[in-house]
Image (cartoon, rainbow, N blue to C red):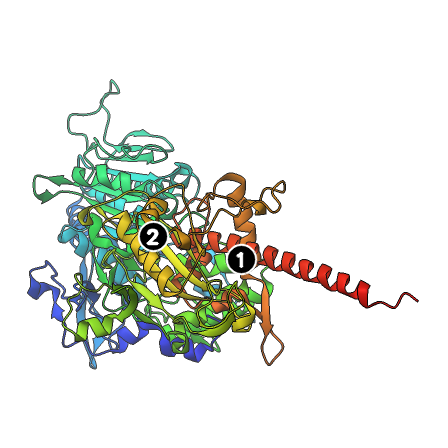
Amino acid sequence: MEAISAEKLIEDYAFLQYINEDKSGYTHAKDAGYDDPDDLFLIGESGGFLLNINKDDKFINTHLFCEMANFYKKNGCYTTYKEESIPYRQLRKREEDRRKNGFTAPCLLRKGKIVNVRITGNHYNFLNYTNMEMLDTSTINTKSKNAKASKTTSFPRFIDAQFWTWHVLEFAERNGFNVIIDKTRRGGFSYMMASKSANRLNLYPRKTCINVAIDKKYLTQKGGLTDFTIKDLNFYENKTFFKRGVLSINDEDFELGFKQPNGSPSPKSWNSALLSVSAAHNPDCAIGKDAVEINVEELSTVDNFDQLMDVTAPTLKTGSFVTGMLCAWGTATNADMQMFERNFYSPKGFNFMPFENVWDKDSRGLTCGYFKSYAWGLEGILDGVEAMDVDGNSNLEIGLTIAYNERVVKKSTAKTFNEYINYLGQYALSPDESFSSSSENIFSSEELLAWETKLKNDPVYKVYTDGTLVENEGKVEFKSNARIKADGGKYNKDWFSYIEGVPKKNHEHHHGCIRIWFHPYKVMYKDKAGNVLNGIPPNMYTITYDPVGVDKENKEITDKHSHNSIAVWQNPIAENGFTTRMVATYYGRPESLEEADYICYLLAVYYNCIGGVAVEVNRGETVSNFNKWRATKYLMKAPTELWDTAIKSKVSNTYGIVIEGAVKLEALRLLKEMLYSTIGQTDAGTNIRLFETIYDYQSILELKKWNVVGNYDRVSQMLLRAIVWKLLLVRVEKELQHRKKIEEKKSIFKHRWY
């Protein structure tokens, strides 16, 4: 982000654009049959929900929401009434009602008038009955360049971003949704979710809340979700008038209730319980316990989340009625983020509340989970102006500028590039940034990140045509989607869209289509017989193809399955000025393996790739299909001389390449070497890397996201290209050495020996 100015960041920021737009044309959720008593949610054109934020609304007098917390801070207790007196019981009853149903106060300034606004019951409980580590605003040193301040343990302050988050959680529960949240670090989510569970367990008897993580240490260690929840439950018992008794307590579980003199639970015990379970190798961990609330912490690390949801989601229903709610949240980590990302961008799969994507650029037609930006609700000061005022109103423009400045500093001080991109993911401003900036791999670099940003934002690189290849009377012709549509073709029958999600988004059809940047062109060249021809030399283009291995019917294919990845590459030869680049791609999953192989075959014919189709052959049926079509002349023989030094001039008779074991490790090394090879220089003298000839944004994004455990089909296809690239270099070197020997022999006869 720091490659552009702070002003440009603010101008392009999608969430700010949404906040500032006129929302009068949207359908209100309450008018569409949803339970929304405060009219805080709209429905966008995508079908996802929108926050009904009025850009001119301003919270005021928010101390009124914190009456009990302020009394406690002043007096060290919640009341001076005599215990169990009538005023004491009335106050307790009032507070229980507010903790359940929320609290309304004149705390909103709208069009110059002060109006009532309601905070949810969980939000009220959070503000008044939860202690947390927080910024001590009285210690802020505005004269310090680094905005120095201290922390203190106290009650939370009111923050507008949290106001909306609390209402999201309430709306989801009222309307039978689960919730999936992508968040940034230091947003107070663990405190909030712990407070929510504690509030429920203390308010309602015989309820069970379950905390889930891949490792219990994320829950039970100091600062973990369970640790916070138990502290909140103990606070009720020791400091409030909501005592329920403690039947049992340990680092993992907590059960409320009173004991009889013999130590057994009282028949009138509260019997609400908090349980903590590990999902590691155990997706069944949360079933059989009849929970009304399940919380999944550090979602990015729960690699079996889909299996967990498959068995857990049914336990949150009784018949057709929803009786429980699951909340899952996470922040960018070094773990494989694909599972988290898939579910976030396909929220309806497990009944997660779908939101219109107002956070990612140019994504308003899509739905996703809920996102909390680092810049929204940010505590900070810029040139004497606070990013959030005393009543909790965020100045998003100041927050974005602070975030921008912090990134500039972090980039200049980070010891490694890994440290820097981890920072971007942890303090993301949009979901796509969170999911694509989570970790470093062998391909990542500042240069690659800059190229990915350029491809994403600069329209000059979007010079492609999407379509399909058709064979007609022995000739292969490219038909664009626009042409097919103009001729009356129908989408999902005669043409398909290019898959742009990495991973594929749920709304995208799995078939995919061909995307071409550069069509084949003719040059003057000599054939093997020495004849001069005008056409496409058979060695000018090669294809790399990573196929899938199993046929699946359309209805079975999901965004979790592998897809075929095919790329056409221009090779550097004398006839084209030694230019190399990716010229076309196909990514998708037709209903049959043969259909995918046929797409590869048509590309081979179209680009005249004689002996130039490098395909992975430890799966699928590509070789047999090409043999059936009498097209094996297009297939490349296994370049075994690259990894077998015993092979010199011997030519392999085996088609295709198997990338496993040592070969895969070598291919990864070669791919890194290929991508960062220098192919020229700019006018300013900056090196041009080979990856800058790849205009496919999705391929670059996969390189950026790649890790050893994920499913990255485009990278797998590029591993084949790396092998072919090395093969081309080896063969060119051999040709040069051969020519050198010939010249040396000629020079012997030209030498004057006397």
Residue 715, x across and y down, in percent: 44, 54
Amino acid carrying mark 2 in the image: Asn
Q: Please, is residue 547 above or below residue 138 in the view?
A: above
Per the image, the residue denoted by label 1 is 725
Per the image, the residue denoted by label 2 is 564
Nearest to the observer: residue 567 or residue 413: 567
Q: Please, is residue 338 above or below residue 686 in the view?
A: above
Residue positioned 55% across, 65% down in the render:
411
Residue 323, x across and y down, in percent: 13, 42
Q: Quadrant of residue 144?
A: bottom right
Residue positioned 43% across, 80% down in the render:
7
Residue positioned 28% across, 48% down in the render:
593
Q: Is residue 692 left or right of residue 11?
A: right
Q: Quadrant of residue 238?
A: top left
Outermost residue on the top side: it is 262
Residue 705, x across and y down, in percent: 43, 55
Residue 221, x across and y down, in percent: 43, 39
Q: Element type at marker 2? A: strand
Amino acid carrying mark 1 in the image: Trp
